[in-house]
Each structure stands twice: as C-alpha cells, then as structure tokens.
Amino acid sequence: MVDKNLINIIAKFIGYQKWPARLKQFIRQERKKLYAWMRFFYTVYRVQVGRRVKKIRPVIITHDANIKIVSDFVESYKNASLRVDRPIIAAGYSSEEKKGQLQRLLNKLDPEVVLEQGSYGFSKRGNLLTYFYYDFFRSVLPYIDEFMLYLEDDISFSSKFCEVLRKIKIPQDAGIVTFYSINEGYGPINRYFMYEVQNPCLVGAQALLLPKQIVELCARSGQDMAKLNLAGWEMKFTAFVKNSGYKLYATYYSYVQHQLTSRLHPSNWLHISNRFIP
C-alpha cells in the first residue's frame, strides 16, 4: 500500500503543485505504473547496497532415499566446486537396506557432520514434516556462523551457481533468497539479477539462502509454522518468515534444477523451473 504521507512529503519537496496541469493529470492516470517502477528501482537499490555473503554453511536435507537421484545430486554438488564451509547433512532413511548405500554416497561430500532425522511414529512424510518444524532448525543452528545454504537432495546445479554465490549481495531486509523459481517464476517482467517476491510464500525450496537470524527465528517457532493453513511445509515456512516482517527474494534465473515431479501435486504436474541456466 502507498504511504500517502510519504507521497505528500515528496510532492512538497519536488514542488509538485507548481507542475503543469497536463503533467499532473498524467501522473494521476499512470500512478500505478509509476509506483511499480519506483518499487523496482528501490529493490535494485536495496540489492546493490546489500551485504556481501562471506561465511556460508550448506545444509543438505535428504528424504527421498532414491539412490539414483541422490547419486546424481552428489556428483552435481562436487562438480559445482562451491567455495563454502563443509556441509551439514540432515539424513533421513526410508529403509535399513538403503541406509548403507546412502551413507557411502553422502560421505563423498566430506560432511562436517551427519545428523540423522528423528522418527516420531508417523508415516515417512509425517516424520519428515515433524522433524522439519520442530527439530531441523534447532539441530543445525550450532553449525551456522553467518548464512545457511539450504539444499534438497533432488537437484542439479547450474555451472553458474558457484559464481552467483560468490558475487551475491543480500538486502538487509531479506529473510530468504531462493535460487530456484518454479515454472516461470514469481515475476517481474524485467531481468534484473534479483527481485522481491510479492507472493505470500515460495513454492519449492530446492536451494535457499538464509541469514543466521532467520535460522534462529525458525528454531524457536516450529509450532507457529506448523499451524499455518497452507499445503506444503515450504509454503508454511516461507510464509512464516514473510509474516515475521522479512522479505522474500528470488534470483531471476534459476541456478538449480529440480529432478522430480512434485510430491504435493498430481504425478503429471512437473515441478521444474523454466528459467534454469545449465
């Protein structure tokens, strides 16, 4: 919503009352477009003056127990040559017979530590959701110095991912930056590197960058996240962060690609990004 007091102050400062009538009429007629452009340039400004990312801790969450998918992820991660801290792995195993295979794969990533997801007596999905809301953030928090790079085990990396991670600046008001935008993304028409997501939440959480204070916030707010009336956990989690006063940002292009169809929608509904750069 436009702050009318701010507009009046700006109008007085630039001498708006003395402007020609036709120009004032044009501004009134096109105010929505003009305001949209103001928001865009303000977003550009926030990104440019944002802070550089220095200490990044990757946190990889595994939950599909699909050997082929995890194997492809491990190779893609290694090929990306990320200049980051050693990863933390939050590992979930769907069966004991696959556990050994997955552990050998995950050890190729030279993890700092492997944290095993809890079992709460629910279905596989129920256990994962319970773990995510109530234990995930608390368990990884001690290993985060500045930023957490949240990664899921069913993605492949762009050849540009390492470069983007090295150069990115984070706006001061950012709660989450996503490197993955589902389908055609969240907008806008422009192709600036990063933009503010106006949607109430993100759909798909394949690769997210979170400041430590957001990890701390989520670590103490599992119940508040879980009770939100949204379909997927990533919708609840990202909506909670936005509702807490932080902004969601997305890179215009996607620098990771999802390898599976969505588990939240019919099997013929592809959960991929059309903005992915190989």
Image (cartoon, rainbow, N blue to C red):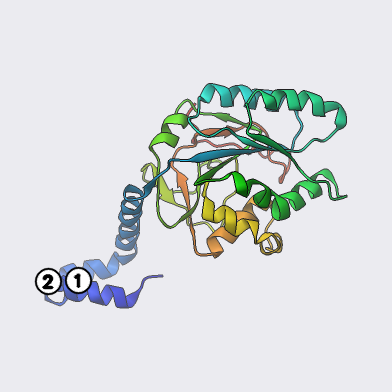
93 over 214 or under it: above or below: above
User: Dot 2: few (<14), some (14–19), or many (≥20) neighbours within 10 Å?
Assistant: few
Q: How many marks?
A: 2
- Name the amino acid, label 2: Pro
Percent position (x, y) of residue 92?
76, 38
**Residue 122 visible in image:** yes
Residue in view at x 29 percent, y 64 percent = 30
- Taking depth in this image into account, of 202 and 148 the one nearest to the observer is 148
Label 1's element?
helix
**In the drawing, what numbered circle is on residue 24?**
1
Q: Nearer the viewer, residue 242 or 100?
A: 100
Q: Quadrant of residue 60?
A: top right
Residue 270 in the image: x percent, y percent? 64, 37
The residue lying at 58 percent from left, 56 percent from top is 216
- Residue 204 seen in render: no
Q: Position of residue 274 (x, y in %)?
A: 52, 35
Q: Amino acid at mark 1?
A: Lys
The residue to which callout 2 is attached is 20
